């Protein structure tokens, strides 16, 4: 028998310090689920949830409580971060970190723009040739000289800033957009405008039905969480995956809300091609739908309601315009094709009886449509159609009445705090405007939601702009634009007399275009165009587009800097503000994204212009005062405690839920459309684009069009019969987090191939796998005319036949740049085309491919023909390594 | 002195792997002298997650079972180990990182396979309920702290009011037949289900309200189909044989024989009108 009682003496678990960090990856200004980081001997030893009451009395937060059937949904006493937040030290200590400045070996700026060979710029070798170590001094000299030369030659707008997107949550050392602090003071720049890539359908579609909304989603969304909990009978979760995508933003409160709905009997129906991570845990019913055929299903539901008279006729009469046109289309009076369940079933794969049962159940109940971003539902070709039809579905059942909403589950609609009261959840940042350093602090962050460059190119059209030299587009695609902006035509470049020019230098701090945007393979091709004379990347990791740069500046992670993060987005138990102290010294020679820009500015005599004389400490303090946190906690106490939980407003229950006021009295409370009502038919679209068959004035089923041919009815489907569902990643946020070795060990993390390499999973139904001789764990080639991506087969009942599911955002690891990727970056072969002709969004899910098993012979052949790709050093746990691309790098 | 135990409520698990990650964060590459040698950077799962997928498209269920060391009352791994493996006063089973060196046989003594051989350190290693943290005053191990859903319930089994004691009453051992006195028990371990969807063929509509009867193994159960025509019998034993019959007034009934070697989805069952 075991000995008893010889336990060791009390262990030393002391730490040198504990700092607090918002470790979500949505980036910018909104913060995340806060974590506590324990540091000892200069190393991160532990990352754990923050216990809200660690330094305060929990009751002082005025915790909210929502009840139904005698059961309560309440805040936890701790934050609920995502798994990668807890694993974040693996990102900071990643073998893929850029440890010092790099220059591409065969990029010699003394050469002419298109010069090749020794002494040339060799643009043709971007993505092929390796890098050498240089000093910060050399790097900033080179960059300063290039900026001066480009400015002199072409003018300031010849520099394209790719400075937008998700990233770490840091106000001052913003992961994106710091370069605009410099370029804005030097005459401007060309802005890559980030289209709302997770909201495409709502942005380009739903806005035309219910107005601007919140990036096209329902607004206001005040108190919808309470109202759904109290009044909804059913939530139809359509496409998005709250168990997954909430992680990147605010952690795991959405999960707790879904469990609460399970507990109190609010039925959850999931409509998606995959049994996603929410559906498999919370779903009472899974209705699998072929990727991007949701519009057919929606039309058949409308058909059932109209023919059975089970929609809210009075509401439609008083709250909407254009129902007659929808009715005529749905009943087939317009085109001779009634949109019956049978018609829809052939397109979407849902049995006719299920469509009818869903429509009837829905008509009897108070039903909310839930999302967490669009999933497969509104990110594909013509995404505006299902997104508009969804609003019509809600409008036909009394949108705004208790229990009837659209909701981004737990992302909005949580109880308001004392400072956000009365404003939307972004409102508090407005406090910064007009304060001493407010504009300065907000500037880097503006690049993500706002189109503000003197000259602009939508992010979806960068490659086209390089190829053709000019592009036209309608609407900037900036997140914050009004609906009417979409009727305005823009041309790049702007007129020469206004400073317009093609861009000849690219500056990226968001080097993931290949793996997150449309047709990533085009990046490899266009970045080699000789007219792109210089490419600078600043990034903590040597990955994706960085490989195509001429100069790479090593930047660092949040654990290596002092900063502040107001965590004001809904979706955790409480909102908070975190004084994020530096945990460890920077890795290698890395500097923060902001410090890197200051280093460049010094060489241009622009340091004072960039810093405006403020130190980082000043800027942190000015954020605190500018956002009026000084009204609720003193600077001294904040510095002592390092975090503050913003109490819930004692009046939080008074805000009417969602569009309740509009529901009650649409005349007195119009929505922001030209008519003030839900526009099932959009006169504005009809006027602006009278001949647009891809986004007509009423939403329709678009089988194919000039922009896309990605249906199973297509001739292309004979060669490429499977539809890819590409969700936001389970184990990443876009491209972030792909180097964490621990999450790769999860079943759906990565698939280790016969060659030991970690492949991105491709979910395939056993039926489709068997037809192709594919077994679980096989390496497979997913391909179409745009290229090939290698994945690891996950033969899985959780995806429907006819569809394969591959998360986007894996890091590229090209065997043949622009043609064959081993890293699993599925976006490299997504359609080049936009959401539709006049909607400059991306269509990066629901496209045709074929999947085939990769034999050892095939792999050997690639190995023989492309030895350099296979010779690159690879980390069996983390994947890509910095030194694989650096001559002599360790 | 407390007697530590854990209940894993599988019905609350969302499969986020926070417990798995927090465990690695605590131990990978970090020695806890007297408690554990550094865990290798990858490959060991002191908190193991066993994903269980059941059923067939489109009726599929996914469970995740979090499996730490069971902290057995009668730890097989300790037998004959001469103190290299020992049970503490609070019931936590420890593998002494020094005394257990070069003794791989300790690993193979665990029927749950939750002791892992560390090639670098040449020692067997496993979950300690974060004993080094408990000894320093922590109330719960890292995995429990990191769990956002309340799946992992930890505490003193001898305190009758503790959450773990309360949950314990509803929990079952994963392998009671081992007779090891596991101090980790489970709620909602997935069993087998039989399900299907019934359709009225003549109307092309889901058959709501059909009566479905399952008989066999000395039991009989009845279900009524819902608005989608769906029925389900959950929690069935494995390896059993049942007769399942479906009846709806005005329709010809159907009967199936189902074997629960795994969970079974019978698919869409089309009932024809009786003549």
Image (cartoon, coloured by chain):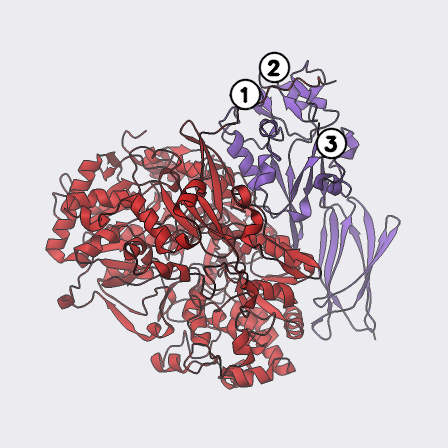
Give how far across and how far down residue A173 sits, in percent: 32, 46
Q: Colour of chain B?
A: purple
State the residue at coordinates (16%, 41%).
Answer: A141
Which image quadrant is residue B125 in?
Answer: top right
Where A785 sits versus A348, above or below?
Answer: above
State whether residue A10 appears in this view: yes
B1 horizontally vs B130: left or right: right
For residue B182, which numbered disc appears in the image? 3
Dot 1 crowding, Cα within 10 Å, few <14, some 14–19, many 20+: some
Mark toward the start of the polypeptide (1 vs 2): 1
Q: Secondary structure at mark 3?
A: loop
Residue that mark 2 sits on = B99
Q: Are dots 3 and 1 on a single chain?
A: yes
Front: mark 1 or 2? 1
Q: Chain of mark 2?
A: B
Q: Secondary structure at mark 1?
A: loop
Dot 3 crowding, Cα within 10 Å, few <14, some 14–19, many 20+: many
Residue that mark 1 sits on = B33
Question: Which quadrant holds the N terminus of chain A?
Answer: top right
A83 horizontally vs A516: left or right: right
User: Mark 3 to mark 1: distance in Å?
Assistant: 26 Å
In contact (CB < 8 Å): disc 1 and disc 2: no
Q: Secondary structure at mark 2?
A: loop
Q: Which chain is red?
A: A
User: Mark 1 to mark 2: distance in Å?
Assistant: 12 Å
Question: Which quadrant holds the C terminus of chain A?
Answer: top left
């Amino acid at each position: 028998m075991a000995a008893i009682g010889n336990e060791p003496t009390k262990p030393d678990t002391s730490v040198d310090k504990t700092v607090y960090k918002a470790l979500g990856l949505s980036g910018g200004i909104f913060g995340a689920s806060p974590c506590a980081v324990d540091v000892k001997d200069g190393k991160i030893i532990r990352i754990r949830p923050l216990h809200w009451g660690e330094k305060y009395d929990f009751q002082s937060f005025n915790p909210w409580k929502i009840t139904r059937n005698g059961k309560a949904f309440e805040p936890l006493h701790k934050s609920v971060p995502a798994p990668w937040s807890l694993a974040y030290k693996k990102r900071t200590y990643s073998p893929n970190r850029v440890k010092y400045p790099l220059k591409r070996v065969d990029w010699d700026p003394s050469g002419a723009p298109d010069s090749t060979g020794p002494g040339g710029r060799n643009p043709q070798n971007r993505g092929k040739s390796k890098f050498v170590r240089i000093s910060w001094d050399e790097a900033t000299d080179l960059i300063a000289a290039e900026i001066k030369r480009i400015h002199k030659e072409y003018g300031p707008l010849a520099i394209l800033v790719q400075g937008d997107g998700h990233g770490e949550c840091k106000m001052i050392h913003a992961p994106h957009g710091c370069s605009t602090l410099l370029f804005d003071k030097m005459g401007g720049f060309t802005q890559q405008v980030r289209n709302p890539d997770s909201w495409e359908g709502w942005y380009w579609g739903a806005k035309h039905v219910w107005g601007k909304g919140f990036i096209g989603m329902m607004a206001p969304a005040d108190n919808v969480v309470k109202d759904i909990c109290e009044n909804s009978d059913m939530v139809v979760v359509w496409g998005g995956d709250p168990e997954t995508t909430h992680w990147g933003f605010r952690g795991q409160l959405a999960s707790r809300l879904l469990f609460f709905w399970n507990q109190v009997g609010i039925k959850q129906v999931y409509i998606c091609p995959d049994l996603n991570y929410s559906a498999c845990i919370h779903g009472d019913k899974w209705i699998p739908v072929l990727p991007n055929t949701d519009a057919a299903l929606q039309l058949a539901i409308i058909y059932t309601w109209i023919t059975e008279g089970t929609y809210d006729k009075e509401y439609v009469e008083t709250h909407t315009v254009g129902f007659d046109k929808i009715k005529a289309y749905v009943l087939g009076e317009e085109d001779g094709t009634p949109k019956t369940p049978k018609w829809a079933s052939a397109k979407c794969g849902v049995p006719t009886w299920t469509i009818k049962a869903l429509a009837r159940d829905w008509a009897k109940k108070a039903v909310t449509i839930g999302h967490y971003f669009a999933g497969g539902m509104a990110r594909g070709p013509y995404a505006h159609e299902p997104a508009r039809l969804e609003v019509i579905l809600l409008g036909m059942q009394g949108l705004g009445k208790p229990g009837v909403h659209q909701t981004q589950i737990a992302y909005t609609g949580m109880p308001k705090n004392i400072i956000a009261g009365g404003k939307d959840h972004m409102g508090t940042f407005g406090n910064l405007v007009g304060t001493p350093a407010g504009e300065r602090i907000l500037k880097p962050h503006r690049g993500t939601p706002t189109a503000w460059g003197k000259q602009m190119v939508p992010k979806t059209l960068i490659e086209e702009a390089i190829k053709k030299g000019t592009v036209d587009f309608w609407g900037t695609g900036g997140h914050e634009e009004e609906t009417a902006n979409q009727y305005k035509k823009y041309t790049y470049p702007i007129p020469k007399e206004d400073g317009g020019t093609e861009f000849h230098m690219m500056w990226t701090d968001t080097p993931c275009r290949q793996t997150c945007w449309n047709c990533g393979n085009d990046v490899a091709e266009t970045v080699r165009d000789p007219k792109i004379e210089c490419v600078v990347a600043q990034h903590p990791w040597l990955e994706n587009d960085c490989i195509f740069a001429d100069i790479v500046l090593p930047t660092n992670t949040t654990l290596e800097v002092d900063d502040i993060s107001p965590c004001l987005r809904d979706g955790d138990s409480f909102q908070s503000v975190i004084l994020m102290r530096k945990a460890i010294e920077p890795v290698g020679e890395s500097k923060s994204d902001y410090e890197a820009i200051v280093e460049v500015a010094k060489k241009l005599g622009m340091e004072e212009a960039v810093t405006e004389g403020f130190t980082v400490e000043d800027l942190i303090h000015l954020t605190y005062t500018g956002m009026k946190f000084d009204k609720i906690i003193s600077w001294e106490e904040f510095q002592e405690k390092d975090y503050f939980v913003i109490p819930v407003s004692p009046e939080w229950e008074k805000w009417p839920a969602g569009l309740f006021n509009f529901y009650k009295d649409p005349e007195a409370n119009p929505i922001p459309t030209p008519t003030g009502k839900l526009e099932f038919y959009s006169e504005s679209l009809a006027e602006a684009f009278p001949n647009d068959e891809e986004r007509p004035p009423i939403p329709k089923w678009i089988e194919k069009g000039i922009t896309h041919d990605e249906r199973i009815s297509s001739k292309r489907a004979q060669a490429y019969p499977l539809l890819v569902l590409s969700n936001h990643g389970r184990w990443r946020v876009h491209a972030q987090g792909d180097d964490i070795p621990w999450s790769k060990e999860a079943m759906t993390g990565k698939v280790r191939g016969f060659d030991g390499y970690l492949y991105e999973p491709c979910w395939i139904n056993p039926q489709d796998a068997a037809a192709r001789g594919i077994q679980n764990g096989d390496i497979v080639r997913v391909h179409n005319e745009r290229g090939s991506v290698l994945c690891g087969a996950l033969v899985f009942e959780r995806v429907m036949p006819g569809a394969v599911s591959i998360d986007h955002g894996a890091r590229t690891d090209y065997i043949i740049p622009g043609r064959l990727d081993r890293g699993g970056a599925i976006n490299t072969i997504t359609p080049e085309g936009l959401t539709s002709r006049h909607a400059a969004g991306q269509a990066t899910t629901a496209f045709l491919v074929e999947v085939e098993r990769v034999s050892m012979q095939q792999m050997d052949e690639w190995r023989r023909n492309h030895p350099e790709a296979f010779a690159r050093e690879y980390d069996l746990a983390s994947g890509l390594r910095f030194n694989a691309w650096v001559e002599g790098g360790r | 002195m407390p007697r530590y135990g854990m209940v894993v409520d599988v019905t609350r698990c969302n499969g986020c792997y926070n417990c798995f990650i927090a465990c690695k964060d605590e131990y990978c590459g970090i020695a806890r002298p007297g408690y554990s040698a550094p865990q290798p950077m990858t490959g060991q799962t002191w908190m193991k997650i066993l994903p269980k997928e059941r059923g067939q498209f489109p009726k599929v269920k996914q469970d995740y079972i979090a499996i730490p060391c069971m902290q057995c009352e009668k730890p097989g791994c300790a037998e004959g180990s001469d103190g290299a493996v020992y049970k503490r006063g609070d019931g936590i089973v420890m593998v002494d990182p020094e005394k257990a060196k070069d003794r791989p046989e300790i690993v193979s003594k665990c029927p749950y396979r939750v002791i892992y051989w560390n090639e670098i350190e040449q020692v067997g290693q496993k979950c300690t309920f974060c004993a080094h943290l408990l000894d320093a005053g922590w109330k719960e191990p890292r995995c429990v702290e990191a769990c956002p859903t309340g799946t992992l319930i930890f505490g003193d089994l001898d305190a009758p009011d503790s959450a773990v004691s309360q949950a314990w009453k509803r929990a079952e051992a994963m392998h009671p037949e081992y007779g090891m006195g596991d101090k980790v028990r489970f709620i909602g371990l997935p069993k087998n289900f039989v399900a299907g969807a019934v359709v009225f063929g003549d109307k092309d509509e889901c058959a709501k309200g059909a009566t479905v009867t399952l008989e066999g193994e000395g039991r009989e159960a009845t279900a009524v189909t819902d608005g989608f025509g769906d029925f389900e019998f959950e929690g069935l034993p494995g390896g059993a044989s049942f007769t399942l019959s479906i009846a709806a007034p005005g329709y010809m009934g159907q009967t199936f024989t189902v074997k629960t070697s795994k969970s079974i989805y019978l698919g869409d069952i089309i009932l024809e009108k009786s003549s």
